[in-house]
């Protein structure tokens, strides 16, 4: 295996892509049995870490996910754990039959299982095509309830791999889910990802697949150049409207995410303005200023005719622009006259955009975001508990599950400010807009993690600086 597999291991595959990846590995000389051993033993090692010396019950289904279960059971048996397998169905694939034949431990009936330490779900994985029948759902739930720790292999049974949909009601929750070979979309999509507990990946040598989505990664950022000044680092202009408080939150985050200069154009100045923020009543002057490298319009903009006029003027300025909040509801296709934009809708704003751009709004979130990116030419950050980024041309980036404490007013303004600040620091082509969206989103998630529980949006905005610090590998002082 090549030594640096990090970029490959961040890819997120559909079931069809995973099958293609498996076929590539087999064409290169591997076998399904060998891949199952690699995957099962890798997963077995995670189970062993959780179980310690404790007892383990493995539930095996008919397909290759069940085959992994037989490998895991044998691995644990070899390492001295007390293991028992409950066979829900006879294996139907050659690889699963072979794996079962290699298992030398106990096979028990479901009724004889008593309380134990770890339950391992190998009933179904990516081959699940329909809801679990009642008997298997009851078996899964009963066994899960009897154990202290529950580990799902590849995917929790009952979850659809490509969509993250739960095909049954009342499915168990898991303390750990071990993905095999590559991440699947369900690992990052609601509701599935909220039930999986911690998620870990076992590498089996899958190669990079063109067109695959990828997981949002921690950005590597550089200190400003030795001869940098505030304008060269990037000047962000924020166009505020009726409620400057939201714009102020965005500005607070933007000041901490890398831009050299943040200016707020507001009709009414906020009551309290941090000294480092420049506030102007002259929005037109700010938009005309050639030194303004990027714009943010939307937080606290309102939805009046004046707000619509401000939005049109901001987009007409032709600068890279983050369009957020109220501006997303006011946005019309004709306003996008060539400026490189990043749109940051939550679900409600997404529906408004889909209506404005003549899109049906049907389908998976990632497909809807890609459709909007394609018709608008903008990078789309579709927010929610499973935030994702879609870019024109098809690139998709999925954010790992972030702190649920982000569900508080004002955090969207902070995200918009962080993204806009990164946009101001970069050059201005499409690729850079995608990069800015990724960097801002990562900083936002990390700031939330650093804040811990029950933070305010203002505290989150301040924590963006600590998150940024984590992206500067030791050289953030700008000195050698
Ligand atoms: N790809 C790779 O590189 C590697 C993959 N690996 C592993 O393989 C897993 C995928 O294996 P898989 O394709 O055999 O699918 P899996 O989920 O075990 O079940 C399919 C079986 O279940 C059946 N079935 C489906 N739904 C049902 C239902 N509701 N109720 C009842 N039955 C139902 C279905 O029958 P059918 O739909 O044909 O009637 C079929 O018989 C993957 O998740 C990973 O763990 C690793 O070993 C390493 C390498
Ligand atoms: K499973």
Image: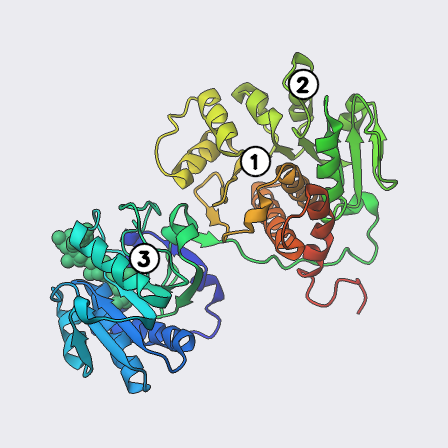
Nearest the camera: 42 or 132? 132
Determine whether the beta carbon of the residue marked 1 sits less than 8 angstroms from the nearest atom of ligand 1: no
Residue at the spot x=32%, y=87% of the render?
Answer: 80
Question: Quick one: which residue is furthest to the top in this view?
Answer: 305
For marks 1 and 3 on the same chain, the one whose residue lies earlier in the sequence:
3
For marks 2 and 3 on the same chain, the one whose residue lies earlier in the sequence:
3
Return the mark for residue 307.
Answer: 2
- Secondary structure, mark 2, is helix
Q: Are there few (<14), some (14-19), or many (20+) residues within 10 Å of tag 1?
A: many
- Secondary structure, mark 3, is loop
Determine whether the beta carbon of the residue marked 3 sits less than 8 angstroms from the nearest atom of ligand 2: yes
For label 1, the residue is 344
Q: Is residue 262 toward the left or the right of residue 152 in the image?
A: right
Whether residues under marks 2 and 3 lie with C-beta atoms below 8 angstroms apart, the answer is: no
Q: Are there few (<14), some (14-19), or many (20+) residues within 10 Å of tag 2?
A: many
73, above or below 460, in the image:
below
- Secondary structure, mark 1, is loop
Residue at the spot x=75%, y=58% of the render?
Answer: 223
For label 3, the residue is 156
Task: Measure the C-alpha gap from mark 2 to mark 3.
Answer: 47 Å
């Amino acid at each position: 295996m090549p030594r640096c597999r990090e970029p490959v291991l961040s890819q997120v595959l559909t079931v069809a892509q995973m099958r293609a990846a498996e076929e590539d590995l087999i064409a290169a000389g591997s076998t399904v049995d060998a891949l199952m051993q690699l995957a099962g033993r890798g997963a077995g090692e995670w189970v062993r870490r959780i179980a310690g010396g404790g007892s383990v019950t493995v539930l095996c289904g008919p397909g290759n996910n069940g085959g992994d279960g037989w490998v895991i059971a044998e691995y644990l048996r070899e390492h001295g754990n007390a293991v028992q397998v409950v066979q829900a169905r006879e294996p139907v694939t050659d690889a699963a039959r072979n794996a079962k034949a290699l298992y030398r431990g106990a096979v028990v009936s479901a009724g004889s299982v008593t309380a134990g330490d770890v339950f391992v779900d190998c009933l179904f994985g990516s081959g699940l095509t329909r809801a679990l029948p009642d008997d298997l759902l009851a078996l899964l739930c009963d066994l899960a309830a009897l154990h202290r720790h529950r580990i799902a292999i590849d995917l929790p049974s009952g979850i659809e791999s490509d969509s993250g949909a739960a095909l049954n009601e009342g499915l168990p929750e898991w303390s750990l889910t071990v993905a095999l070979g590559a991440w699947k979309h369900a690992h990052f999509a609601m509701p599935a990802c909220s039930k999986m507990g911690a998620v870990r990946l076992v590498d089996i040598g899958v190669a990079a697949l063109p067109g695959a989505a990828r997981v949002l990664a921690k950005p590597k950022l550089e200190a400003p150049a030795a001869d940098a000044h505030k304008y060269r680092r990037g000047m962000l202009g924020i166009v505020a409207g009726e409620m400057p408080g939201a714009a102020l939150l965005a500005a607070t985050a933007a000041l901490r995410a890398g831009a050299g200069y943040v200016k707020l154009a507001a009709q009414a100045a906020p009551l309290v303005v941090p000294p480092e923020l420049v506030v102007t009543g002259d929005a037109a002057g700010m938009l005309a200023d050639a030194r303004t490298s990027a714009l943010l319009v939307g937080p606290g903009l309102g939805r009046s005719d004046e707000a619509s006029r401000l939005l049109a003027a901001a987009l007409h300025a032709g600068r890279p622009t983050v369009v957020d909040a109220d501006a997303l509801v006011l946005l019309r296709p004709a306003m996008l006259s060539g400026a490189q934009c990043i749109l940051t809708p939550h679900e409600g704003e997404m529906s408004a955009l889909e209506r404005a751009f003549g899109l049906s709004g049907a389908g998976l979130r990632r497909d809807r975001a890609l459709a909007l990116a394609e018709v608008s030419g903008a990078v789309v950050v579709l927010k929610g508990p499973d935030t994702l980024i879609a870019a024109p041309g098809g690139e998709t980036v999925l954010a790992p599950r972030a702190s649920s404490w982000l569900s508080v007013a004002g955090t969207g303004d902070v995200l918009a400010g962080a993204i806009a600040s990164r946009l101001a620091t970069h050059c201005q082509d499409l690729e850079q807009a995608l990069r800015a969206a990724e960097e801002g989103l990562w900083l936002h998630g990390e700031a939330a993690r650093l804040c811990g529980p029950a933070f305010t949006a203002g505290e989150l905005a301040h924590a963006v600086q600590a998150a940024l610090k984590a992206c500067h590998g030791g050289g953030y002082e700008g000195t050698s």
